[in-house]
Amino acid sequence: MNEFNPNILAFCCNWCSYAGADLAGVNRLQMPPNVNVVRVMCSASVKPEYIFKAVSQGIDGVLVLGCHIGDCHYLTGNHRTAKRIPLAARLLGKVGIDPRRVRLDWVSAAEGEKFQQVVTEFVEDVKKLGPNPMKEVRF
Amino acid sequence: MIRIGVFICHCGHNIASAVDVEKVVEFAKTLPGVVHAGHNLYSCSQEGLSSIKKSIEENELNRVVVAACTPRTHEPLFRRACEQAGINKYLFEFVNIREHCSWIHSKEPEAATEKAKKLVAMGVAKAALLEPQEEGESKVIPRAVVIGAGISGLAATASLLGQGIETHLIEKSDRMGGLLKDVAIIGPEGTDSKSLIEAFMSDIRTSPKAHVHLNSRIKELKGFIGNFEVTIGNEAEDLKVEAGAIIVATGACELRPEGEYGLCEHPQVITQLELEKMLSKSELTAKNFVIINCAGSRQPGREYCSRICCNASLKNSLRILDLDPDASVTILHRDVMSCGTAAEALYMNASDKGVRFVRYSLEQPPQVRAEGDGLFVEVFDETLDEKIDLDADMVVLATPLVSPDDSVETSKLLKVPRDKYGFFLEAHVKLRPVEFATDGVFVCGSARWPVSARECIWQGQAAAAKASIPISEGKVRIEAITAEVNPDKCVACGNCVLACPYDAIEITDRDGIRAAEVNEAQCKGCGTCVAACHNDAIQQKGFSSRQLGAMIDALVRATTEGTQ
Ligand code: FES
């Protein structure tokens, strides 16, 4: 059997995390190729609905990355992210999806290494969880 | 009809060495809405841009996707190309397959190619749903604020004033001049620092457009490029100043590694800056000098080279010998970094004049001990391969410049990032060296990285030149990424009103229909309200839930149906 290769979606805010991901690239930091980044202006614009949509369609894991608390380009935007995303993860738990398929973290524009570390860890974690069970569900 | 053109960039070898560009092009051709897919060696070159423009015309494209490097640096360039070819620039979508793909999966070409295909599929799906947008314009307040009156800040201020721009210069201490106040002579050329600072200060003093605030700090910053509101505070009062641009020139300070090398234990152990003070009074209180370079730098936790210390040690040793030809100077170093023609001459000169150079290693740093009235420095000489004991009556530590503690506060107030050592981080090392990613905020001098006085002046003037662009244009375009409400879906619950960090939304009554309304001028386009809406009634332009949803669908499709 082929090794399970998770398919992961990541939302990165334009000001910190996307820049941190860029920096990881500039420094040629190698990481598993499973994470596909979507740029959003602020982590606070990530609707829980996007996470539900992705997971219900079989995406194996969702990363939400934003600026560190206090550093959000839009003042307090990520305070909301900090509440919303864990709640979204908990709701997934209620319907039988392991909440560890969603991870929220803070990556600054200077933290290329942290981006690499978060991506590498998350891919490992999702590999351990196995394929998203929703892939088997036919509506 | 949607007609999408996709252009995949080789970026020379940068992308093509990991990603099979041709395969991605073939894949792109199969995506819905794509009528043309091609590749360029360098999409951002003149040639690349004109071939994109030509293709827009020939294929009657109305959406453009470029898969290349990062939108954070190159989006404006491609957007401009689209505009020139007659397409609204908001119909352009950028896919990052360099920083986010080829560079980070350089050893897995197959996986990188597959990932590039997925990313392109996502970009194309979003592009199909993009809509043209009109950009608003906002006026620019013709005034600048410079934070920090060290040499960089002075150079920036003088340059702004020279262009006729009213400038507020904010300095936390009670005097202008920064670190150079304590230094008599700078640089290998031996420039007199007093007259250098004085030249800038007299420009500032005599200008009617200059406002200098000593003993003051930034307390609050609101607004955005062209329309900042800066609260400047001192002990007595707060003052609000409106400005179009801000320059951060907060500098660096000297590390004082207390307790290390006997600093603070023995009065004869001093730092380079203390030596500078002594030299500026032209009086020497010692005869045998041992200067320890890299004291506290290029070591775990502070890996960087502070760049100015080697030259300062060389310059100061010559100065010591000038004042007292019988003095002896030994420089303990790990390598002498005296780059540049003038500095290298300084090194040769110091060797000729009898300055001794002893090389030590990080593993065996020099040890300073007191015996009787004197000091001894024990060091393992790498060249002789043995321990030597130097007798010294003054030990000088060439410590690195470090970011001042209060730069954390500045970074939080201005929302600008710092690197792991606490220095400010520019938008792009090469393409935007004195700008922050935040429009209208600039950086120069040692706030960014330890630099020499000469480089501080260059950067101060560069930052001033950049800051003067929006000010002299008098207006800036506001990116059309604001939120908009669909009144038919809105139930006027008010969640978005509470969520908005800028108070830009209110519930209004429009012909008896209550709905949320966004004040475009106040909206900064963060999208926080979008995620707060239960009804999907509020959307951020360029990041709508349909567009992001389509990206998710495309990722799922590319994975389940394969990308072959
Ligand atoms: S802009 Fe990064 S989290 Fe808000």
Image (spheres, rainbow, N blue to C red):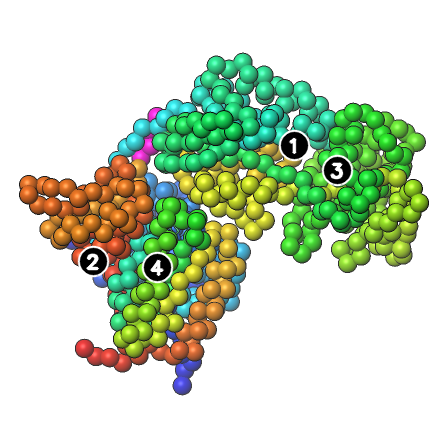
- Whether callout 2 and callout 1 share a subunit is answered yes
- The disc placed on residue A83 is 4
The residue depicted at 22 percent of the width and 55 percent of the height is B533
Judge by depth and name the residue closer to the eye, B113 or B411: B411
Residue type of the residue flagged with mark 3: Gln
Q: Position of residue B537 (x, y in %)?
A: 18, 53
Reading the image, the residue beneath label 2 is B534
Residue farthest toward the front in the current orientation of the protein:
B236
Left or right? Give the position of B138 relative to B241: left
- What residue is at 87 percent from the left and 51 percent from the top? B378
Q: Are marks 4 and 1 in contact (CB under 8 Å)?
A: no
Q: Are marks 3 and 4 on the same chain?
A: no
| Residue B272, numbered label | 3
Residue that badge 1 annotates: B179
Q: Is any part of residue B517 visible from this angle? A: yes
Q: Residue at x 10, y 51 (%)?
A: B488
For the residues carrying marks 4 and 1, which lies nearer the camera in this image? Answer: 4
**Mark 2 or mark 3: which is in front?**
2
* Chain where mark 3 sits: B
Residue type (three-letter) at the residue carrying disc 2: His
Dot in front, 4 or 2: 4
Give the chain of mark 1: B
Per the rendered image, the range of residues in magenta is: B472-477
**Left/right of residue A90 with respect to residue B109 in the rendered view:** left
Q: CA distance from mark 3 to mark 4?
A: 49 Å
Looking at the picture, do discs 1 and 3 lie on one chain? yes
Where disc 4 sits, the SS reads helix
* Residue B107 lies in the magenta-colored region: no
